[in-house]
Image: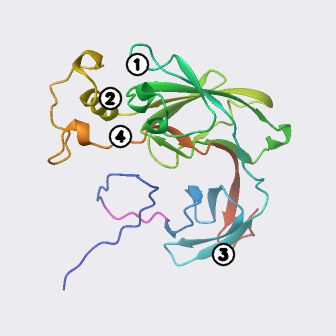
Amino acid sequence: MAQGLRVPLQLGPADSLFVVFRKSDDRLHLISANPELKVRDITDHEVHVTAFKNGVYLLKICDGRTAEFGVNEIPSEIRLTGGWKVCFPAGWGTPDSVTFTKLMSWTEHENPGIRCFSGIARYEKEFKVPGQWSRDNSTLYLDLGRLWCIGEVLLNGRSLGIVWKPPYRVDITDAVRPGSNRLDVEVANTWANRLVGDALSPEGQRRCRTNITGSGTPRKPWREVPLRESGLLGPVSLLIAVEKTVALPGNSSSR
């Protein structure tokens, strides 16, 4: 009779990992959990999780135990609306800076240099954080919504890391301050849009040189390839997540 292994994995969107088979491991692990939960640790007595939304959650453990708990203390997110200053590097047919009244793909902009821009652009914005958002058992996150294709977040001059897959979310707890804050998001896309733009431009107006003549799309030259949406697409929001310790059956209730 054929035999096999069943391996429980907890992966987020676009996540990947290596699976290495060693000797038997009897450590406890989750069989299932809501995707809105981030499981930080699990012991024989309790599970430590981070919750991003209010609701009722169910955890299933590999030994057959289950634990149900609720979260109701998370305040509504704060959406960062209004205009963004967007700065572009010189020499690529774009203005030094423009104001986006709303977040949109560069490919939707009226300026042809921005539509076909490839490289790194910097988004700048100031926002305020209510003082009551500071709590002992909570973590404050900045959620960028969507972007293409990679971004770095800087808050009050401090880099908080690079995001490249959903959720495009960073922990800003140690960098944020009550009142006014300065946010910079640097977003880079690929060279594809500029190569399309060059293919559609007279030779004297092209911005880059390359020996890559094929677009990678079968039977389509660069001039026929659709532009790839790029930039910070949003919506951008401030979120509070709460830390919970959930007791497993046979112990005291979650706190």
Toward the viewer: 219 or 252?
Answer: 219
Residue in view at x 62 percent, y 42 percent: 236
Is 7 placed left or right of 59 in the picture? Answer: left
The residues tagged by marks 1 and 2 sit, at their Cα atoms, a distance apart of: 10 Å
Q: Nearer the viewer, mark 1 or mark 3?
A: 1
The kind of residue on which mark 4 rests is Leu
In percent of the image, x 38 and y 31: which residue is there? 116
Could you tell me which secondary element the residue under label 3 belongs to?
A: loop
Q: Which mark is residue 93?
A: 1
Disc 1 from disc 4: Cα separation: 17 Å
Figure check: 211 above or below 254: above
How far apart marks 4 and 3 lie (CA) works out to 54 Å
Left or right: 139, with 133 as reference point: left
Instruction: Please report whichever mark, 4 or 3, sits nearer to the chain's N-terminal start.
Output: 4
Magenta: main secondary structure equals: loop
Q: Which residue is mark 3?
A: 249
Quadrant assignment for the C terminus: bottom right
Give residue 184's quadrant in the image: top right
* Residue linked to disc 4: 227
Give the vertical position of 145 relative to 249 (above or below): above
Whether label 2 touches label 4, CB < 8 Å:
no
Residue at (54% x, 62% y) in the render: 35
Tell me which corner region of the image, top left, top right, bottom left or bottom right, holds residue 129: top right
Q: Which residues are magenta?
A: 23-29
Contact (Cβ within 8 Å) of mark 1 with mark 2: no
**Would you identify the image quadrant in which residue 144 lies?**
top right
Q: Is residue 26 magenta?
A: yes
Q: Residue at x 67, y 23 (%)?
A: 156
Applied colour scheme: rainbow
Q: Secondary structure at mark 4?
A: loop
Indicate whether 92 appears above or below 178. above
